[in-house]
Amino acid sequence: MSTTAVRRPPPPFAQEHEDFRKVVRRFVENELRPRAQEYEDAKWFPNEVFARCGKLGYLGLKFEERYGGQGGGYVADAVWTEELARCGSGGLAAGLGAHTSIALPPIWKFGTEEQKQRWLVPGIRGEKIGALGITEPDAGSDVAGIKTHARRVEGGWLVNGSKTFITNGVRADFIVTAVKTRQEGGHHGLSFLVVERGDGVHSSALEKLGWHASDTALISFDDVFVPEENLLGEENQGFYLIMANFQWERLLMALGSLGGMQASFERTLEFARERRAFGKPIGSHQAIRHKLAEIATTIEVGRAITYDALRRFVDGDDAVREVTMAKLATQRAAFDVADSCLQIHGGAGYMKEYGIERAARDTRLGPIGGGTDEIMKEILGKTLGL
């Protein structure tokens, strides 16, 4: 009798999702990963990648079919995000993810039908590329401190100010932008405008520790006219648009970290089986064997808490605590796992050839982006009644 049991997909995944996972993994391994180093060296990946992913349906997995999406919901999108992290370039995954999972959702959830036709439909096809503009030089996690302002003029607004750390900020055709439309009232005076690329919109690429393939930008708005019909949602209600996608964004970061950790672990396990020292594979030495066991456990713990948060989110539960825990548990862990994998590779891990040094650099953003670890702990403290 075989001791190997067939493992069922963990909730909320079904067999159809696991079959889809195999398809996505083949695409990532065959079309994206082989060019990861090229994109990293160029500090750019071509817009054709968006078009290719759009053609295959990957940019519209959770969106309705009437907009050109696949209607697969959040779980299918979760599979895509986890597998995309295996592409070998955090910047490539970030660029695609920021477009479909951060820039498009506010239009999907709060846009008018006309706005969805203008931006969501071509966005799903990869023909127009979006970015989300919230963070500013003087306002990171404190969204109430946003200074970019929109002044009412005939037919719309004039926008002035700047945004920073904006993924896709150089290439974006449109920027879903948080602006002050009322000076008093803190976060109650925020609105969202879809700012299209044009006169007065200036972008400059930022140099970064990791995510080299993504175009992270400082964007300035200099008397940019935005027409009335580009208001997203209700005026002065933009804070709710910001909060509406935070849970999904943080879940995606946790899922992406799982995929990245798993990929680094698999490569390191293979290396430990092949690399020999003192007459035997280094994986046979207790120090390395125990470290690999610890890494495997760390990944499995992260997977359990993240999949549980995903299940609760998909079921419509209030999953703020679980999602926050998932992000907190996986982001620093992903960096630590990458660092441990680099150590096991020894000198080879410090070289570009193996891709481990890139994983270490790319994962360092996790405890910062989408809400810092410190902000996650504050949120959790409040859920505990503190």
Image (cartoon, rainbow, N blue to C red):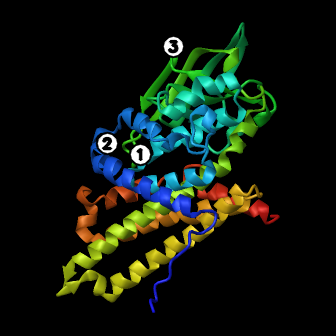
User: Is disc 2 surrounded by few (<14), some (14 to 19) or many (20+) residues within 10 Å?
Assistant: many
The residue carrying mark 2 is 39
Element at label 2: helix
User: Is disc 3 surrounded by few (<14), some (14 to 19) or many (20+) residues within 10 Å?
Assistant: few
Q: Amino acid at mark 1?
A: Gly
Report the residue at 44% width, 40% height from top.
53
From this view, report whether residue 133 is shown above or below residue 24.
Answer: above
In this rendering, would 55 be left or right of 372?
A: left
Q: Residue furthest top?
A: 154
Q: Position of residue 112 (x, y in %)?
A: 71, 26
From this view, report whether residue 327 is shown above or below residue 40.
Answer: below
Q: Amino acid at mark 3?
A: Asp
What label sits on residue 199 in the rendered view? 3
Instruction: Point out the frontmost of discs 1 and 3.
Output: 1
Element at label 1: helix
Instruction: Point out the frontmost of discs 3 and 2.
Output: 2
Real-space Cα separation, disc 1 to disc 3, in angstroms: 28 Å
Residue 76 is at least partly visible in this image = yes
Q: Position of residue 330 (x, y in %)?
A: 54, 64
Circle 1/circle 2 CB separation < 8 Å = yes
What label sits on residue 168 in the rendered view? none
In this rendering, would 86 be left or right of 367?
A: left
Q: Residue furthest front?
A: 1
Real-space Cα separation, disc 1 to disc 2, in angstroms: 9 Å
Q: Amino acid at mark 2?
A: Tyr
The residue carrying mark 1 is 91
Quadrant where the N terminus lies? bottom left
Indicate which disc, 1 or 2, sits on the residue closer to the N terminus. Answer: 2
In this rendering, would 116 be left or right of 200?
A: right
